[in-house]
Amino acid sequence: MDTARYSRQMLFQPIQESGQKALSTSSALVVGAGALGTVISNQLVRAGIGKIRLIDRDYVELSNLQRQIMFDETDVKDAMPKAVAAKNKLEKINSQVEIDAIIGNVTAENIDDLIKDVDVVLDGTDNFATRYLLNDACFKHQLPFSYGGVVSSRGMTAFFVPGKTPCLRCITKEGEGDGQTCDTVGVIAPAVDIIASFEVTETLKYLTNNQDALRNTLKTIDMWYNRHYDMKLTAPKAGCPTCQKETFPALKKNAQNEETVLCGRDTVQIHRTSQLNLEKWESQLMKIGRVRRTPFLLKAAVDEGVDLVLFKDGRVLVQGTEDPVQARTLYDRYIGS
């Protein structure tokens, strides 16, 4: 352990050398390498965590640069997958940290492998379907889950610990969202930074054996209108299917649809197959429109205002619509079953 690198952090009384050593042997799964995920990963790597497993399904676009701190214009030009671009930056920040970058989607099929051997899971996602999946997996495997979400100038965050706090399902209800996304109401970077910092702070408390200092609230903030609210995490909700009945509904293999509307992206993701040959599809789709292939993805303009982005792991992003039916029609037209 490089004590000179972490000297200021070790001077902080609750951490000291013992806490720093605990961090150096800890590992985290960060789901999402967008706005929240890049701030989370940056702070964890600089703090000296031993290993980060980072997964993201998307690639870098120009609109990301306003708030996604790991990326630059070169990443946009190269259409770099976010997980790879983040890994490249993180390894330059701290070469002592092991970075496992995965280009892909978190599903009920792969979540057990993703959380294997990690000590904590941090939420850098943009949708509740994935958050419920992470919540259920964490409570099934007795792992803490650091939840956070941001839109506009507002954010929410909580740190859930199986056996000590309720879970995400206890304090939220599926389908109760107000429908607002970054695309419809925007988002400012300071709100992202604050929520991500709360997520990491609680994680550092947990990993350095300072659990008595955990906040134990659902914190809600509005950076623009100066509103702050804490709701105490009390008893779990009676009959909660996750932390009480332990049925874990999001982990059922058919719990996730093959079509997923991506928050604020005017995009629908379709995942029907386990792999796609990008070279083959480049040859096929270049007959229809402009095609660009990188080592990680293939982007094809197939219709007016519509692009298809194909990934090796079988995912296809239909860009230009948020209607799953229309996206499915376009997918069937150009990709097939």
Image (tube, rainbow, N blue to C red):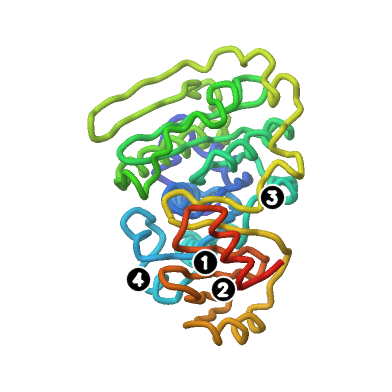
Say left or right for 306 vs 260.
left
- For mark 1, does the 10 Å Cα neighbourhood hold few (<14), some (14 to 19), or many (20 or more) residues? many
Badge 2 density bin: few <14, some 14–19, many ≥20, Cα 10 Å:
many
Q: Position of residue 24 (x, y in %)?
A: 58, 47
Amino acid type, residue under disc 2 in the picture: Leu
Above or below 300: residue 67: above
Tell me the mark number nearer the camera, choosing from 2 and 3.
Answer: 2
> Within 10 Å of the Cα at label 3, are there few (<14), some (14-19), or many (20+) other Cα atoms?
some
Q: Earlier in the sequence, mark 4 or mark 1?
A: 4
Q: Earlier in the sequence, mark 2 or mark 3?
A: 3
Q: Badge 3 is on which residue? A: 114
Q: Nearer the viewer, mark 1 or mark 3?
A: 1
Give the labeled residue for mark 1.
Answer: 81
- The residue located at (58%, 73%) in the rendering is 296
Mark nearer the N terminus (2 vs 4): 4
Q: Provide the secondary structure element on which disc 1 rests.
A: loop
| Dot 1 and dot 2 residues touching (CB under 8 Å) | yes
Question: Does 320 appear above or below 112?
Answer: below
Circle 4 residue: 73
Q: Amino acid at mark 1?
A: Pro
* Residue 4 showing in the rendered view: no
Q: CA distance from mark 4 to mark 1?
A: 13 Å
Question: Element type at marker 3?
Answer: helix
